[in-house]
Amino acid sequence: MTEWLCLLLPVAAASGWWAARHARSGCAAQGTVPDAAFLRGLNYLLDQRPDKAIDVFLRLAEVDGETVEIHLALGSLFRRRGEVERAIRIHQNLVARPGLDREQRGFALYELAQDYMRAGLFDRAESLLQELTEIEPEGRRALKALIEIYQQEKDWTNALNAAERLQGLTGRPMAAEIAQYRCELAEEALRAGDPEQAGECLREAQAAHPQCVRALMLQARIELGHGDAAAALALCRRVAEQGPQFIPDVLPKFIDALGRCPGTDLEAELRRLYASHPSPALATALADAIEAAAGPAAARDFLVSHLAEHADLTALERLLELQSADEGGCPETVQRVVSRLRARQSAYQCDQCGFVARRLHWQCPSCKHWGTIKATQPGSMDPSLDSPPTPPGA
């Protein structure tokens, strides 16, 4: 249903122009045939019959070759059907027409830019969109489309500039996106062997979005590289405090920094963190620390208590490994089954669209939102959450 609503947007805009044009000329009041045909085309779209709608709009375009609205609707329909070359020709002819008013020309240029983007001709689309940024009301949509292009091309400097311009135009906060673009620039600087430039990018990212997990983790990486374990540990703690969904990714740096800080107790630190933010990765790390300090039996006891509260396959797999070391421990078949189940379990999921992944993506490959993919958490073992609802009248 959403796909069809998106399909109707350009046609709805075109119908607005159509109604205004005929209202001014008095044709709408007379109930002319073109008006009836146009509405019939819209009805075909509502009935999910785009082929019929295209036939209607093609006939209208032949009858009234000067009607901008029909050509705009027709070009959009062709693009959404995948006939991009036909859409490009229609929109190119519109743009070349003399006498278009500013609003109509802006709409036609935007539609042509969308055609070029669909065809993968990003350089042509970018050129048109740059022109459109100076034309209202298309300027905002043009900036959004430019950001999409720059993200696909990994041109983070231009993406950052476009995002800052869009934020200034709309007033809509884009701190999360701006911070991510600066993190991308920091990653590029690190790959180029320039940690100072990377640090500057990360400071700007944190100024834009102080809770940006990625910026904090990258800064912790730089601090560890400089040998400042205390600073890295403080940054890792800031990440961990934001919730258990971030712990799996920051935990290796957290443990590394703890190991470099004299006088720190790894087990005690992990226990404090676990008390407020239990997670599968943290539970297994704490079990390893307990085993090293007090032996396998203490680690097993901890994991059993953890599993009493959390339906955690990762912790269960670790518990079975510990039990298999004992004589008459867990059968190997059970271990294999649990390992297979855990391997099939999605490690990450997008908060926005539900996309599941095996590894962390800073930008969701599906919905393209930034910072929405997070580590999945095990369900509660509270039996009341699993009980069926009470039937009415019971």
Image (cartoon, rainbow, N blue to C red):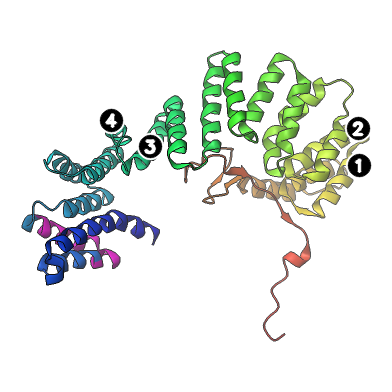
Q: Residues within 10 Å of mark 4 (few under 14, many from 20)?
A: few
- Mark 2 or mark 1, earlier in chain: 2
What residue sits right under mark 1 in the picture? 298
Quote the CA–CA distance across marks 2 and 1.
9 Å
Percent across and percent down for residue 226 are 70, 14
Quote the CA–CA distance across marks 1 and 3.
58 Å
Amino acid tagged 4: Ser
Quote the CA–CA distance across marks 2 and 4.
64 Å
Q: Which residue is drawn at the image coordinates 78% and 49% (left, top)?
A: 331
In-front residue for pair 35/280: 35
CB of mark 2 within 8 Å of CB of mark 1?
yes
Comparing labels 1 and 3, the label whose residue is closer to the camera: 3
User: Quarter of the image containing the N terminus?
Assistant: bottom left
User: Quarter of the image containing the C terminus?
Assistant: bottom right
Specify the label residue 143 is tagged with.
Answer: 3
Secondary structure at badge 3 equals: helix
The segment highlighted magenta reads 43-61
Quote the CA–CA distance across marks 1 and 4.
65 Å
Amino acid tagged 2: Ala
Specify the label residue 293 is tagged with.
Answer: 2
What residue sits right under mark 4 in the picture? 127
- Mark 1 or mark 4, earlier in chain: 4
Amino acid tagged 3: Leu
Secondary structure at badge 1 equals: helix
Percent across and percent down for residue 46 are 29, 66
Quote the CA–CA distance across marks 4 and 3.
12 Å
Secondary structure at badge 2 equals: helix
